[in-house]
Image: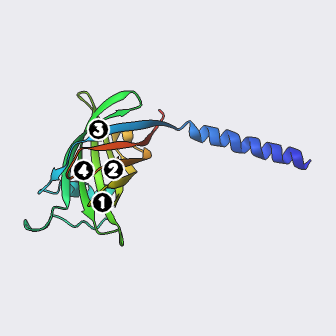
Amino acid sequence: MNLSTFTIAALVLLVSANSNAGDYVCKTINGVIQPFAADPDCNILRFKDRHFPDATFLGPLPAEAPPVCFAGSLTATLGKQQLTGTAFSGVIANGVGQLTAVSAIKLSAGSVELGRIFTKDLIFNPDAATTEMLTVVAGSKVFKGSHGQFEITGNITYQTATLTGQLCIEND
């Protein structure tokens, strides 16, 4: 009798795991990010109230201070789909002993805007072989309810960098 109970419990877990797995389609994303430029208007602040209410932004700061808000462009492949994008990022003060930022990335396929991905970012070794880990915290349009994580290799404030990761989108 214990074996039957165990078997039924295992089957229920497998079925529920498979039904939840069908809610999302996960795809690999690979791309290139062009060097970011300082964003004196700190456009990332437009998204603070809705997507980053707990973030304490460092900008905008006086002109003589180093920039803390950035903007740039990227090209990527999500699965087999070619994408272009623009991003706004801002350094935040929430990481104790760790350089942190948030980003809003608008992605398009050709002339069709697919939506935005909002991320919280950890930045490692910002002055040399920089690596950034971006975790998706929200999305809009096609990316509403999405989740995933990306890695950026290279210091995007000085050079072209690579983007790799996985993005999981709700399966309609």
Q: Determine the CA span between mark 4 and mark 3.
A: 18 Å
The percent coordinates of residue 17 (x first, y second) are 64, 42
At x 30%, y 32%, the residue is 83
Q: Earlier in the sequence, mark 1 or mark 4?
A: 1
Q: Earlier in the sequence, mark 1 or mark 3?
A: 1
The residue tagged 2 is 118
Q: Nearer the viewer, residue 30 or 78?
A: 30
> How was this image coloured?
rainbow
Q: Earlier in the sequence, mark 4 or mark 3?
A: 3
SS for callout 3: strand
At x 35%, y 52%, the residue is 119
2 vs 1, front mark = 1
The residue tagged 1 is 101
The percent coordinates of residue 45 (x first, y second) are 21, 58
Q: Determine the CA span between mark 3 and mark 2.
A: 11 Å
SS for callout 2: strand
Residue type for callout 2: Phe
Mark 4 in CB contact with mark 3 (< 8 angstroms) = no
Q: Earlier in the sequence, mark 3 or mark 2?
A: 3
Residue type for callout 1: Ala
Residue type for callout 4: Ile
